[in-house]
Image (cartoon, rainbow, N blue to C red):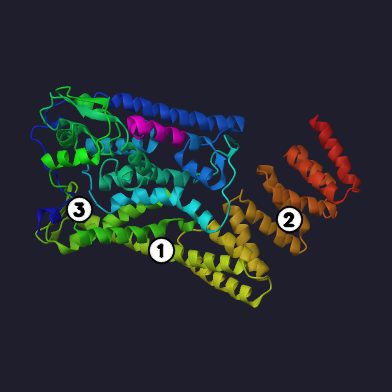
Amino acid sequence: MTRVETELPLALPHRERCGTAQGFGGSTRAKWRWAVLVLVHIAVIAHIAHWKIAGTTLTPLEPSEAGETLELGLVNAGFLLFVGALLLTLVVGRFFCGWACHVVAYQDAAAWLLAKLKLKPRPIRSRLLMLVPAYAAIDMFVLPTVGRWLAGRPAPELAWHLTTNDLWERFPGPGMALLTLFVDGALIVWWLGAKAFCTYGCPYGALFGLVDRAAPGRIRVTDACEGCGHCTAVCTSNVRVHEEVARFGQVVDSGCMKCMDCVSACPKDALFFGFQPRLTRAVAAPLAARVAPPRRWDFSWPEEIALGLAFAGALFAFRGLYGAIPFLLAIGLAVIVALGCVLGARTLRLPTLRFQHWSWKRDARLTRGGAVGLSACAAAVLFTAHSGWVNGSEKVGTRALEAAARLPRASAERGAGLERAVEHLHRARAAGLFENATLLNKLGQVEFELGRRAEAEAHLRRTCELEPEWESAHVALASLMIASGRTSEAVELLLGLLGRQASAQSERLVATALAREEVSAERIEQFGRSASRERAIAVLEQALRLRPELDSARSALTRLAGAAD
């Protein structure tokens, strides 16, 4: 048994009498960086307020929006921001991450609060988990394009998409957004150290880190440096600053986010930000070998493999769970669960173990903190396994549904495929802990095609209750009602949806009912005066295209158009 095994994470050797606890001052740049990050959040609030007041606004300034550009060809503000940030990083390094990223702000705030509580977490160092951000970047920005190529679909034509009337369209709901920020901005810091999500989860950070390697802008050092290590003590990006400047004359770790804490905290003013050509491998190798300490990791290779497998399993379990868990939240949860698996195994295997600031096991006996921690690990593993069963059942059912949809209608093979899909989807619903509108919508539409109208209507009604603005569920439920001879009820359902949002399918169904005189033109006119004149006019115009001689619709259209003038 080694010290590496009994202490997680391993406390790396450091200079004595170094750090704020020893009387040295902290960073004087931190307050300026916090002021900038506060301004970033004020800008976000102003953006949301403008959308709420004006009804339309600039598309989200979020790097994830670049996926829409690559997949659909829509050049939005998020894509332009991401490209601009990458170009900036190519010159000055990762300033954008340190000074403008809201998730970095939450992680730094969590680390500050934990330090105030005397619980400052040390960084976990894992070889395989460091590959997660690269995987996430490939998943978000490369695989959709590769999938399009393999399917033989042409590249989309580029088109400007700088404004939107639904700022939140591609984001999770408020509750899930807050949970994402809590897990990726706070909980992961408590378990894996400062800026842990940047290290083990952020897909944008992977790209920024790659570009940073070519940036001439670096933290550099003068001959005044005495190697005191105070710079490393104040660094919140887990960079071994004093070692890197001793080896290379500059910080080369792509994890450096140019927060400038080390520069402001240096008692000799030996550090500064400057420009210098990138070190080539031929130059860097002998410098690194000159004074290179051995790289220390917290896990053996068997444990690293266990971490990788646990992460993959947890990501499968959480991604898209209950139709709600977004990708980046699933990554944060999966990283934490993977660590919990290895931590739990060590706790059971070793007679002594200390994790972060808690002693979990001493003299082959669990401490009180260890009992709580081990119980939490076990609960997390059980919840993950259950989530994997639920999510896996839904995914199998969805694949069966997609396969059946490609078969001819009314064929025996299609019917058998739909039955298999229903079986797996019902299994997922029965095992689930929460209602899943996505699952209910699939069940409702499949059972409608199979002729089980009562079951289909119950599922679709519940879907509409859970997701009042979900167009596909409302249209499917209305189609079921029309097929059952309840057209007027279907029209009222669709008019309710049209009163809240645009829906081309709803307009078409209502116009068809009007053309067949299954709903009166007066009802559409009333809807136009009380809810949406624009959508009522669109319905009346479509009805007249289907049946030009419908005088009641023409009269209603004339009155609404006149009211608009």
Residue receiving disc 3:
369
Type of the residue with mark 1: Gly
Badge 1: residue crowd in 10 Å (few <14, some 14–19, many ≥20): many
* Element under disc 2: helix
- Count of numbered labels shown in the rendering: 3
Q: Which residue is mark 2?
A: 490
Mark 3 Cα-neighbour bin, 10 Å: few <14, some 14–19, many ≥20 = few
Residue 550 appears left or right of 159: right
Camera-nearest label, 1 or 2: 1
Numbered disc 1: secondary structure: helix
Q: Which mark is residue 554?
A: none
Pick whichever of labels 1 and 3 is earlier in the sequence: 3
Query: Quadrant of the image for the C terminus?
Result: top right
Q: Which of marks 3 and 2 precedes in the sequence?
A: 3
The x, y position of residue 187, in whole percent, is 32, 46
**Alpha-carbon span between mark 1 and mark 3:** 28 Å
Describe residue 37's horizontal placement relative to residue 441 as left or right: left
Residue in view at x 26 percent, y 35 percent: 112
The mark closer to the camera, 1 or 3, is: 1
Residue in the foreground of this view, choosing between 3 and 352: 3
Q: Of label 1 and label 2, which has the lower sequence position?
A: 1
Which stretch did the figure color magenta?
Answer: 81-97
Instruction: Using the image, determine if residue 283 lies above or below residue 25.
Output: below
Residue lying farthest top?
A: 269
Image disc number at residue 388: 1
- Where is residue 222, by image quadrant? top left
